[in-house]
Amino acid sequence: MNKIALIIQREYITRVRKKSFIIMTLLTPFLFALIFIIPALVMTNEDKEFKKIAVIEDGSDLFTNVIADTRDVDFEYLSGVKLNDIKNTFSEMGYYGVLYISPDLVTNPDAIQLISRKQPPIGLLDHISGSLEKEIERQKLLAYNIENLDEILRTINTSVRVQTIKMDETGSARETSTGISMALAYIGGFLMYMLVFMFGSMVMRGVIEEKTNRIVEVIVSSVKPVQLMLGKIIGVALVGLTQFALWIVLTLALVMIVKTNLLPEGTMEQIQQLPRSLAEADQSVPGAATTTVTPEQLTEFQEIFAGALNQPWGLIIFSFIFYFLTGYLLYASLFAAIGSAVDNETETQQFMLPVTIPIILGLVVAMGTMQNPESSLSFWFSIIPFTSPIVMMARIPFDVPAWEIALSMGLMLLTIFGAVWMAAKIYRTGILMYGKKTSYKELWKWLTYKG
Amino acid sequence: MILFEAKDVTKRFATQTALDGVSVSVPEQSIYGLLGPNGAGKTTLIRIINQITAPDSGELFLNGRPMRQEDVNIIGYLPEERGLYKKMKVGEQALYLAQLKGLNHSEAMRRLKYWFKKLDIIDWWDKKVEELSKGMQQKVQFVTTVLHEPRLLIFDEPFTGFDPINVKQIKEEILFLRERGATIIFSTHNMSSVEELCDNITLINKAHTILEGSVEKIRHEWAGNEFEIVFAGEVTPSPNGHFTVLSSAFDEGKSKVLVKAAEPVDNNAILSAMTAAGTVLSFNPALPSMNEIFIRVVETKNRESAKN
């Protein structure tokens, strides 16, 4: 068998068999699945209990029956009851809360209170204020004595809901959800940072292990140092890809299991209907005002799924794998060079700093990128190879021009060649040097050694 | 027939010269000792032979032709600083190293079983390396060095860390390997093993060769006109113009006397003086040990260079 293949095989198998690998691989999907499942559970299970709310108007009936009952909430209009009569006893009387409307509400928007034992859901408050606002508007308009007022109102009644739609150059539009893009940017950038760091330093520890064990001398009498280094880097990369693939598969499996077993009936159907309603939405995008189909029907939960489904998944996954491999290769070769230059792990500190600074900088810029994906800072950091894997992953959910991605990827590939070449030079000399504390000057000499 | 030859090898590192014009030539099927104080350049020379580092100048020949990178496949190298992957199982690891040397899986397996049985370490096959004692690990490493039946074996300090029984066992194996046709270069500080094993040596000091040749010849050259005579009974010969007595010891009915011959050396005159003194059991030139020669040569050299 080819020697480098043998090295890759050993690096791969010894790592994959480790307990820590197996535990990490099995546990992480639970964390990922929780990230997906918890918001869904929270939204679908949001306070479904039936509520009764007592409405008290202080001596007037301006707003009687103005607030319509909803699926979960009934409004009972109590006349002749004072707030103080019921204030302390509504809970025992079976009410969720008391809505107190003061007669001067028309002139004073603060003259309304909802008293309850628990924090009322936002949706309920929106419903109440929305209904009352409309009624107050109607009553104010009524005061102008306009003919056919109801008719006019019906025709001008408009519902506005901001959908963010970005047009790409071909003119086709896509509905995006900024929230989902931000979440993806965050996950992509952070995961990239974590993986590059984790597997990069795994390579470094492997190199140090071989050096301190002195096994390296036996091995380099059979293979060239650069073969050993590349074998290790590739072997660990395969470990990373294996873990990543297992994470995706296991996470999806978990999400599926939870969806079918834990989410309430009907959720699945709602999700399945989404693509269809989205397709309709898409077609009618240019005349957004006529889009009467979707917005009202989409619950918040559905919207999140719709946004998620609408992401450029192919591009995201492709870029993620590309940037993981290249970013890893870049940093792993630097880490390998560091590992070869020191005698033990504590000595790595002095060389780690210049290597970790770009990674951390990348992460910091990536976090800012989520707020402002088109800033020139984000642009440059997503082009410069040392930070581009992390920053570009944070930009991609927000749509990045193809040429920028191509430029970033091209520069990345060029840099890798340089980094691997440099690392191989340092590594070749470093792994056989013992006892002396290595300085940067020394490293430079190793780089310029010939032969 | 010369199997391996290094001509005029020089290697400089940033701050020092490790080898300066060193040449060695190793006859086939012999054991060649590479001696020298710590830091003399032995390990550098060994690394150069193994193609781990390249010399700044000088040439290496194998079988009379210039050495190539692929030639490392016919070399077995046991480094001084030995190490194995601690978390790997012994058998697995030996198999891995054997395959790196170019053996296929089944052949490597067959030979490993043979050697593991021979050196009594077969029970350790499935143990992790970190569970083994240092001596055991050394044996495993010895096996992985010789497994691919290299024509040229290089042992850097092969006996450190072994108990006397294992030292004897390894010595026997080294002699056995030579018998089977291997050529062996080994570096050591253990001079008694040099006398026992080596056919030829090179002594390197501060990057230069200061002594080389066959062990036999060197010891005779350094004999310094001394003779060891063993008498029956307690006998002390009285010195005459031909010799002086350096020491004399009586033990278990025999006297061991060391004499120094005066110039010009007349062996017959000394011998007849001895036979006159008592019953001579043996009369031999007293060969200095390699240990003495080592110390004398290196110290002389260091004094010389201190003067310059």
Image (cartoon, grey):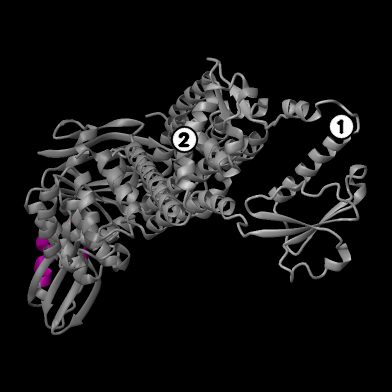
The residues colored magenta run B260-274
Mark 1 residue element: helix
Is B266 included in the stretch rendered in magenta?
yes
Label 1 neighbourhood size at 10 Å, few (<14), some (14-19), many (20+)? Answer: few
Q: Quadrant of the N terminus of chain A?
A: top left
Asked if both marks, 2 and 1, belong to the same chain, the answer given is yes
- Mark 2 lies on residue: A320
Which numbered dot is residue A141?
1
Residue A186 location (% of width, % of height): 58, 41
Going from the N terminus, do you reach mark 2 or mark 1 first?
Answer: 1
Q: Quadrant of residue B50?
A: top left
Q: Amino acid at mark 1?
A: Leu
Q: Amino acid at mark 2?
A: Phe
Left or right: residue A404 versus residue B180 is: right
Q: Is residue A199 above or below residue A312?
A: below
Q: Is residue A358 visible?
A: no
